[in-house]
Amino acid sequence: MPGRTARFVFAIVLAALLASASAGATVRVLLALVPSATVVAEGAHSGRIDGAPAFSTPTGLSWPVGLERGKLVVDGHAIGTSLQLSGTVGAPLRFQGRRYRGSIELIAHQDGIEVINVVNVEAYLRGVVPAEMSASWPMAALKAQAVAARSYAISLAGAHGDYDLCAGVSCQVYRGMDAENARSDEAVRATDGIVVTYDGRIARTYYFADSGGVTASSDEVWGKSVPYLVARPDAVSPTGGDRWRVTLAPGVVEAALSRLGIGVGTVTGLQVLGRSQSGRVDRLAVVGTAGSATLSRTQLEAVAGRWGLKSMRFTLAGPLSLDGEGWGHGVGMSQDGARLLAEQGYDYTQILGYYYPHTRLVRYLYGAAAAR
């Protein structure tokens, strides 16, 4: 890590709404794709069917919605292809046991009902920041997390058709109102509207749990070079950070390989054949009784979850035993590294400047504070 005096600060400037991000003040978050759904309005609410105003009621109601031949069904009647329920202030909507601000839209597809929370970006962040980072961590780290999450969300506007991003680890974790915490709320408010930009556009600010000592470049992980997503030394916990060991059962390895159309007989061992610039394994040989196969980085990513690997920073401790460090893909901001830097006195602008070099901070003017 560079010394404390290194110049990480990058300017915060006021700017008009960026043309590249047309999502406005809301984000559309896919909560689930299900065969049927029940949304509970806890108080006064209104509804739109296929985009047109349909009703308004001062009381709370439960809305069980089914699917038949590509149409939404309520009380045995087909109503259309979309139903949007909007609660009033102080009357949230509930789905699968969690409360959500804004509105919930149900969209019919042949393979299920998309349940989408349409919510103000800043309100959305209140359910993201404490789900992605412990609200007890230093305020500078929480602010960095808020800005990274905001930038990531807005950069994905319109990326998936009906919705912008999902609510799980494939996008960024979002748990609605029940996750909200006073400290993370403070971090969101203190950074209201601030985003990371590169070359006049909102940056795709990837982040992850723990680098194991070195972050990865987007090129080595995904095969696409991005100037602000580069490999660099990371802050390391005095206790060694997130270290792990996995001992693989031959059958588990064989099943994962089978999904890739690869067979080597009974698996007997592994061999590391290559590492990326950040020390992550990018070529691995799997040896079996019927031969061997070399897995590329892409193939390794495909089997990592089934093998229980937390990251690609590992060494072999035995024929089928792996000693690893870190957790996640390694690209962008290390959340544990952000915590450590905050504990050393870095402010959130310095943390973001380190993990996303060549970028700047811009206040994204979408009327977020008024909408919240």
Image (tube, grey):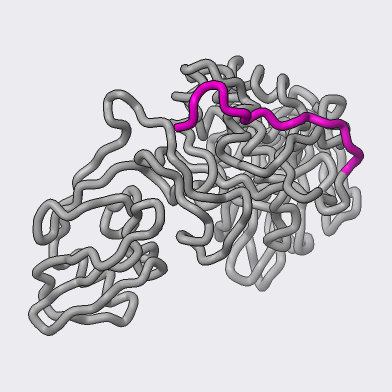
> From the viewer's perspective, is 136 left or right of 184?
left
- Work out whether residue 58 can be spotted: no
Q: Quadrant of the N terminus?
A: top left
- Residue drawn at x 79%, y 42% is 26
- Residue drawn at x 49%, y 31% is 2
- Work out whether residue 274 can be spotted: yes
Q: Nearer the viewer, residue 40 or 122?
A: 122
Quarter residue 370 falls in = top right
> From the viewer's perspective, is 73 left or right of 209?
right
Magenta stretch: dominant SS?
loop
> From the viewer's perspective, is 240 left or right of 14?
left
How many numbered callouts?
0
Residue 5 magenta-highlighted: yes
Q: Quadrant of the C terminus?
A: top right
Q: Where does residue 265 sit, x and y in percent of width and height?
A: 13, 80
- Residue drawn at x 40%, y 43% is 214
Quarter residue 262 falls in = bottom left
Q: In this rendering, is residue 291 above or below 299? A: below
- Residue drawn at x 50%, y 63% is 222
In this picture, which residue range is highlighted in magenta?
Answer: 1-17
Q: Where does residue 153 sit, x and y in percent of width and height?
A: 68, 45
Q: Nearer the viewer, residue 64 or 322?
A: 322
Q: Residue furthest bottom?
A: 290
Residue 181 magenta-highlighted: no
Q: Where does residue 269 sit, x and y in percent of width and height?
A: 12, 67
Q: Where does residue 126 sit, x and y in percent of width and height?
A: 64, 28
Q: Nearer the viewer, residue 89 or 315?
A: 315
